[in-house]
Every structure is written in structure tokens, then in C-alpha cells.
Amino acid sequence: MKQPAKQGGLWWGVALLLVTTLAAALPKEKAASSDQGPIDNQATKATKALYYNLLNLSGKQVLFGQEDALAYGVEWKNWHKSRSDIKDVCGKHPALVGWEMSKLGQGELNIDSVNFQHMKSWMKEIYKIGGVNTLSWHMDNFVTGGDSWDVGERVVKTILPGGNHHEAYKQKLDLFADYVQSLKVGFLFKRKIPIIFRPFHEHTGGWFWWGRPHCTAEEYKTLWRFTVDYLRNEKQLNNILYCYSTDIFKDEADYLAFYPGDEYVDILGMDDYHDLSIKGKSEDLVRRLRMLVHMAEEKGKVPAFSETGQEAIPDEKWWTQRLLEPIKSDSVASRIAYMMVWRNARKDHHYGPYPDHPSAPDFQTFSEDQWLIFEGRIPDLYRFPK
Ligand code: BMA
């Protein structure tokens, strides 16, 4: 029997209620079950798959990335959807994009005037094309209120448990946790976007307050372990891979001097601008990458060239001759999972090409090398292979 018209509205109401209840009852993202897993065994399946796939990329291909790529470029900024200097040059976005958390919670913009809300949209965009997002954090000095280059006080010990600024540090991590929690895509069934977090980077140098002249190895390790435990256990963030990234280092012992332990690190990274500068030598770059790959493989971790570049790229063939050829032609150094160049801020401070730059044709050639991964040829990084 046909329902009287009067009851039609009621049925729609019931149906809507059913759909909403069902959506709320949908299972939360499940944890995966792979032996080759990241340090967080409660990580989401997509995060575990990312780790697994990055490990397996090693030796096959390398993701190419740039800091802030979608947020601005040389002589353009503001809100754009789907623009990057790299895409303007070669038609494809980088497969990995770095983002910066400095000034989180202190206004709408980060240290480089990137709007934190817009940043979320760009991260989603990168995730949707199958790419990877990595976050760094030039954290302000907790003692002086200065920036991360303000190295005047021994800050690290003051933010450890029991230190004067520990609570302030925890509040920063709370802000970070809220931000990372909100990185989701999907409508009814929301999926968290896996990210790579790379805190307290370049500590083998002395320019940041967490650098090794300004704290002991034990303090650094304690800070790192506290940070991971807090985010993973207290805040229950389960979409993070943790990357330990030094600046240049002498040997493996030097690299590992501040290493917090295999239980606390997923990715072994290295930042190296030094060996790619005019005075730098490719042999030194390759030697360091070989050590990095060797340590990562011994530990079952992902090796990554977490930051590099040459400011303003004075060499027209820099991409193919200085960056690609030495790494790709070495059977060990080439086993890194990704490489990322720094940001394109202005004509005198950029590390990627832009359309009129003399190195743009060479970058085009570089981007066509099938060893490198750009948008359009990114393998499925967020699912385990069938
Ligand atoms: C540095 C420079 C600065 C920037 C900082 C944080 O290397 O690019 O201009 O503010 O990184 O992104």
C-alpha cells in the first residue's frame, strides 16, 4: 500500500537518521598488520602502507620534492589552487611537498607568510594526487622568545620534563596535535592524511637552539623521545612517520651521536647544501649518502635526502649534472626514497627553477628522467601492494 503523502516526510527523517547513525558507527581507520612497520604500531593502515612503500621504493625510484611548492613561487603568491613553479616549468607538481609549522598558534601565518588554513588545502591536494607531505618546525626559543636561530640560552634542558618551560613546550605540541588531527579527507568516512614529521632538524650544525653545541646528546635524545611519546601515546596521533635529519656529518658515529634510538625514528634523513655548493664536491655528497643508506638499511629504516639545493642555482646544468648524475649513478647513494629542495621565496632565495630561470630547460630534462617521481607517475603509496 502506498504510504499516505503525510508520512513521506517522516520516512525521509527516519532514513536520514539511519544514514547518520550508520556513518557514526562506521569503523575507525584500522591499524594495519605488517611486520615491516613504522615505530607506531597503532599507525593507520595508510601510514603503515606509506612506510612500507617508501622502504620498497628504495633502489627503484626517488620521489622529488620541494618546500612550500604550492603556496608561492618566485614573484607570485596568494591563494592559488594547483600552481607551483615546478609545474610551471615541467607541467607536473613535485611528488613530495614540505611545510613549515613555525609560528603555529600565533596567528594565521607561518614564518614565511603561508596561511595555516590554506596549507591544509594544499596538503590535501598533494595527498589526493598520491603525493607525500612532510612537516618541519623552526620553533621559537622558549627562553628568550626569539626565533630558532636565537641560540643564546641552553633551551633544550628547560623544555624537558621538570624544566621551567616544559608546560609551554607541551602546549606547542598540543597545537601541533590539533593541526595534524584535522588533516583529513573524505566526507562520511574521513581518512587521516599520513605525514612525515621532521622536528629538530640539522642538529649537527650550530645555527638552531637545538643544535649540538647548545645541548648534550642525552638532552637531545630525551627531548626527541618525549616528543614522540607525547604525540603518539598522549595525543594518540597515528598518522605520523618520524624523520631524524642531520645536517652534514663526518661518519656514521657522528650521524648517530644524537640518535634517539630505533624505537623512535622511521626515516633517516640528511640535509646537505654544503656538498652541492660551488665549492662542494660530488664525491662528498655521494660518500655521505652511502653512509646514510647503509645505516638505514641496517636498521630497516627509510633513507631520505631530506633537504638540499643551491641558492639561486647559478649553474644552468645543476639539475642533471650536480644533483641527478652523481646520485643516480651510484648503486648505494641512489637507494634514497626521496629528495627535497628548499623553497622558492625570491630571485635571490630560491632552490627550485621557475619559468625564466636559466636552469629551467635542464630541469625539464631532469623531470623527464624516469628514475625521478613527479605528479602523474606516483605509485600507490597509501595501500599495500596486492
Ligand atoms: C630558511 C630560509 C628562511 C625561512 C626559514 C624557514 O632556510 O628560507 O627564509 O624563513 O628557512 O622556512
Image (cartoon, grey):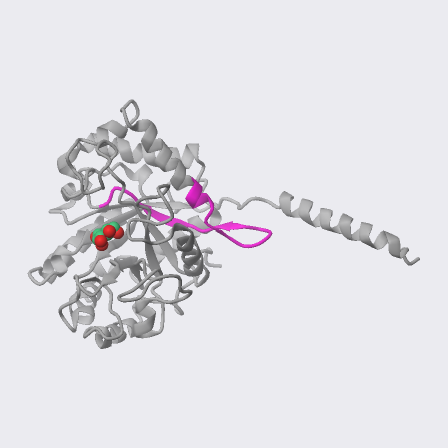
Q: Quadrant of residue 53?
A: bottom left
Q: Nearer the viewer, residue 147 or 296?
A: 147
- Residue 257 visible in the picture: yes
Residue name at image x 41 percent, y 66 percent? 82
Residue name at image x 16 percent, y 62 percent? 310
Q: Quadrant of the N terminus?
A: bottom right
Residue range (magenta): 178-201
- Vertical placement of residue 383 versus 145, above or below: below
- Vertical placement of residue 292 versus 357, above or below: above
Q: Nearer the viewer, residue 49 or 15?
A: 15
Q: Nearer the viewer, residue 312 or 239?
A: 312
Q: Say if the magenta span includes residue 191.
A: yes
- Residue 332 visible in the picture: no
Q: Is residue 74 left or right of residue 204?
A: right
Outermost residue, right direction? Answer: 1
Q: Say if the magenta span includes residue 3.
A: no
Residue 8 percent across, percent down from the top left: 83, 55
Residue 98 percent across, percent down from the top left: 32, 55
Q: Quadrant of residue 27?
A: top right
Number of numbered discs overlaid on the protein picture: 0
Outermost residue, left direction? Answer: 279
Q: Is residue 233 left or right of residue 307?
A: right
- Vertical placement of residue 171 versus 273, above or below: above
Residue 130 percent across, percent down from the top left: 43, 61
Residue name at image x 28 percent, y 72 percent? 369
Q: Quadrant of residue 170?
A: top left
Residue 384 percent across, percent down from the top left: 46, 55
Q: Nearer the viewer, residue 269 or 214?
A: 214
